[in-house]
Amino acid sequence: MELFEKYLSNMYLYEEELYELLIREIDKVIARNYDFSCSLFDTHGDTIKMILQANQTIFWSVWDYLESFHIYTKNDQDEVNILQNKGIYVVKSFFGADEVAELLIDWENSIKSVPEITDEIHQKSLLNRSYFESSNDIRYTIGSIHDGKKRVMHSSKHKMPNYFDKHLRKNIFLNSIVQKYYNFKREIEPSIVMAEHLYPPKYYREYEAWHIDNLSDQFKIMIVLEDMTEDDAPFIYVEETHTIQEIFKDRYHKMYTTNGISTQEQNHFEKSFVETSLVKRGILSAGDVILFDCKLHHSATFAKNGGNRKNIMLYYNSLPTAKNKFLFKIDKYLRFGLK
């Protein structure tokens, strides 16, 4: 503690010493199988969060050290190698027609469970672009009339619709790709299975909300349920943007200082931040699947001309990576959000 206080007295003068002290603490916690008790992350989590907010050099050094516990290695699955290189992988015709038909049953029942849009819900959706509510072990989201979106989220902690459970939550192939992507030794399952419907907003406009989903380690898989055209709100993305490039660091650190590791409210950026010449459009077919690292630069477009997109999204949120365990441990401290 004495050394810690000394280094804190001038975290820029003692930058290297402070970093090395944090690394020793990380090593101790990992050696105790992630037992944080009596570590600095337990007793002085707010101070460590302040250090990571204030000193970008220390933040990215700690980030790189935590990342090293899940370093990419050459894999026996081509899908995993492509994901590691590009951050995204599209599997054509992964689900057959019969499987898609079954998934559509659960998708339709999920979307039907969303209540009718009353004037009260409509007004609430106008305040935050979407209205969020929980009911009967599910969560749903209704977009405003300007956004054209409905989502129903089924948690793996509760009863899952039959076909979602059969084809998605327990899908050995899809889960194994996520497991191998992060070098996990144990099996992994999605934490949420979400039915999503994108439809034309009241007023069509050109708008691409480029973003990453989170700075935390998070993974998603999209399952397309109907053949798409350009009018059906295609998913757009830029390959090889899932790793932390030097030009991203200032922006991403600002996201962290404002919202922490879960950057939901600060994860968007202007179009000029995106290599628009490299943008790809996911105009896909029923049964196609997109797997992607959530730090990939991506967006959705609006449905138009009567088009719509029916898809399911698998969320792998609570991934047990070293980075998630340490940075979520201190994430409750020193948020700058105004809520």
Image (cartoon, rainbow, N blue to C red):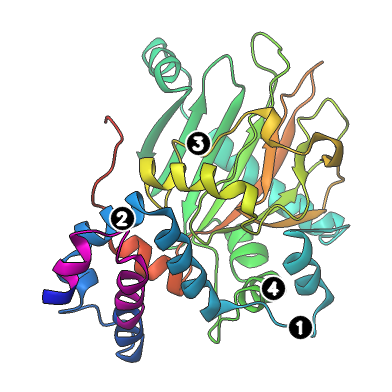
Q: Earlier in the sequence, mark 4 or mark 1?
A: 1
| Above or below for 159 versus 333 | below
**Residue 259, position in %: x, y?**
37, 43
Q: Which residue is mark 4?
A: 177
Q: Residue at x 32, y 74 (%)?
A: 17
| Front label number (4 vs 3) | 4
User: How far apart are labels 1 and 3 at the CA level?
Assistant: 44 Å
**Residue 318, position in %: x, y?**
45, 64
Between 178 and 269, the one lying in front of the other is 269
The stretch in magenta equals 4-24
Kindly check if marks 4 and 1 are in contact, taking CB atoms under 8 A apart as contact. no
Q: Which residue is mark 2?
A: 331
Q: Say which quarter of the image contains residue 87.
A: bottom right
User: How far apart are labels 3 and 2 at the CA level?
Assistant: 34 Å
Position of 12 compared to 277: left or right?
Answer: left
Q: Which residue is mark 3?
A: 113
Q: Which residue is mark 1?
A: 74
Between 278 and 339, the one lying in front of the other is 278
